[in-house]
Image (cartoon, rainbow, N blue to C red):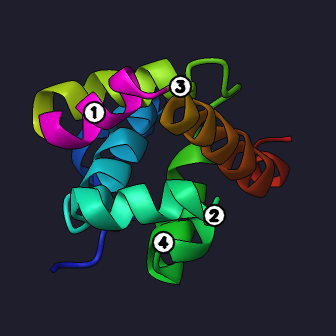
Amino acid sequence: MPKFNIKNIASTFGLGFLPELAPYIVKGLLIEYLSGVDIKELDKWIEQDVSLWSKIDRDYHEDIRGAVSKIGDLKWFTSDWLKEGLRKDLPTLCSLFLASDKASDWLDRQIAEIKAQVTTVVS
């Protein structure tokens, strides 16, 4: 997979568009990562309360931090926001979060952890 590069995005679309594009970039990165996870594996992570952030490749960490650094706040970064993207692109995974309170709570914790990991970039 070609390496994502926030500088290439900036040069293509201009720096003024980055704050508007960054949430879509972050969503795309998370969905791209989750597309490689099957439902059984995800269910196991939920049961064992495994950290999603710890499972995400470090290259993705930097890509997510790079995109988030272009945004003023992270109010948009919620589990509902990610479920909406999953609903369209990975409906099987999304159904797990919609059907199970435990899975939904796990996703809430993952979003909070990812926010904590990238907040120092935004602050």
Quadrant of the snapshot with the N terminus: bottom left
Q: Earlier in the sequence, mark 1 or mark 3?
A: 1
In magenta, the rendered stretch is: 91-100
- Closer to us: mark 4 or mark 2? 2
Task: Name the mark on residue 56.
Answer: 4
* Cβ atoms under marks 1 and 2 closer than 8 Å: no
Residue at 50 percent of width and 63 percent of height? 45
Which mark sits nearer the N-terminus, 3 or 4?
Answer: 4
Kindly check if marks 1 and 3 are in contact, taking CB atoms under 8 A apart as contact.
no
Around disc 3, counting alpha carbons within 10 Å, would you say few (fewer than 14), some (14 to 19), or many (20 or more)?
few
Q: How far separated are the C-alphas under marks 1 and 2?
A: 18 Å
Residue 97 magenta-highlighted: yes
Q: Earlier in the sequence, mark 3 or mark 2?
A: 2
Residue, disc 1: 94
Location of residue 67 in the rendering, given as x and y in whole percent from the top left corner: 50, 49
Q: Which mark is residue 101?
A: 3
The dot on residue 51 is 2
Give the mark nearest the N terminus, 4 or 2: 2
Report the amino acid beneath label 4. Answer: Ile
Circle 1/circle 4 CB separation < 8 Å: no
User: How far apart, in angstroms, are the residues tagged by discs 3 and 4?
Assistant: 23 Å
At label 2, the amino acid type is Ser
